[in-house]
Image: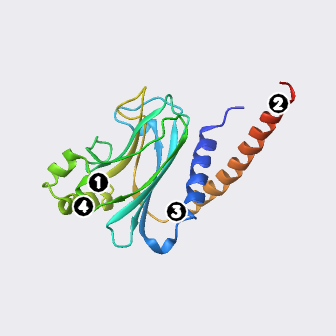
Amino acid sequence: MQMTTFGRVAVCAALATVSTAMVPSAQAATTFTTTMLGANENPPVTTAGIGFGQLTLADDMNSFSVLINFSGLSSNAVAGHVHCCSAVGVNAPVAIGFTVPSTTAGTIMGTYDLTLASTYTSAFLTASGGTAANARSTFLGGLSSGLAYLNVHTVANPGGEIRGQLAGAVPEPATWAMMILGMGAVGFAMRRRHKNVTTTVAYA
């Protein structure tokens, strides 16, 4: 049975919630979240791929952690970035690149030091005045203004397959409900997978 789009969103959100629960909340000042879809790309991409992204700034705003759970991509992921700082819907330069798994469903996570020049792409660093301090200011300004987005690129869609604008807000009740439903969906999927594995072994 194929999982619906809502189901995929719920699973991604639930996985992100569980992973975030492992990080001490005292270390985070601001959290930005987004749902990543092909329809958010410019131009839009037709794909079953979906993702839930979260970027959390440390309390000193000198570093951030990123967590992206994705599934249903048309082909393996080849890159993941946070882009900044253009108007919503406009393609923006890559600010910082992430290490991604070469899969159609998986997790991207890591921590990035905003005080290091090596954290930023050379183009973003140059456009920001050539120093890490300027790049940090540009990035934080764009992020807080809602001008940054997460993007996952694939073999079939090298320009980006799923994308989501980052917004800093406490999750709405509906979002929490979706996350809770997603946790149930994860459990259901795991039980179904276990059942299928057992059946396969029995008839091998």
**Could you tell me which residue is drawn at 15 percent across and 49 percent down?**
126
Closer to the camera in the image, 71 or 126: 126
Crowd class of label 2 (few under 14; some 14 to 19; many from 20; radius 10 Å): few
Cα–Cα gap, marks 1 and 3: 28 Å
Residue position for label 2: 201
Closer to the camera in the image, 40 or 92: 92
Q: Nearer the viewer, mark 4 or mark 3?
A: 4
Q: Which numbered disc flags the more N-terminal residue, 1 or 3?
A: 1
Residue position for label 3: 171
Q: Nearer the viewer, mark 1 or mark 4?
A: 1
Q: Quadrant of residue 40?
A: top left
Crowd class of label 3 (few under 14; some 14 to 19; many from 20; radius 10 Å): few
153 displayed left or right of 4: left
144 displayed left or right of 164: left
Cα–Cα gap, marks 4 and 2: 54 Å
Cα–Cα gap, marks 2 and 3: 42 Å
Of helix, strand and loop, which one carries label 3? loop
**Which residue is the extreme one toward the bottom?**
26
Of helix, strand and loop, which one carries label 2? helix
Query: The residue under label 2 is which amino acid type?
Result: Val
Query: The residue under label 3 is which amino acid type?
Result: Pro
Where does residue 87 sit, x and y in percent of width and height?
Answer: 27, 48
Q: Nearer the viewer, mark 1 or mark 3?
A: 1
Residue position for label 1: 119
Of helix, strand and loop, which one carries label 1? helix
Cα–Cα gap, marks 4 and 3: 26 Å
Up-down: is 194 above or below 65? above
Residue position for label 4: 136
Q: Which numbered disc flags the more N-terminal residue, 2 or 3?
A: 3
**Could you tell me which residue is drawn at 31 percent across and 67 percent down?**
62
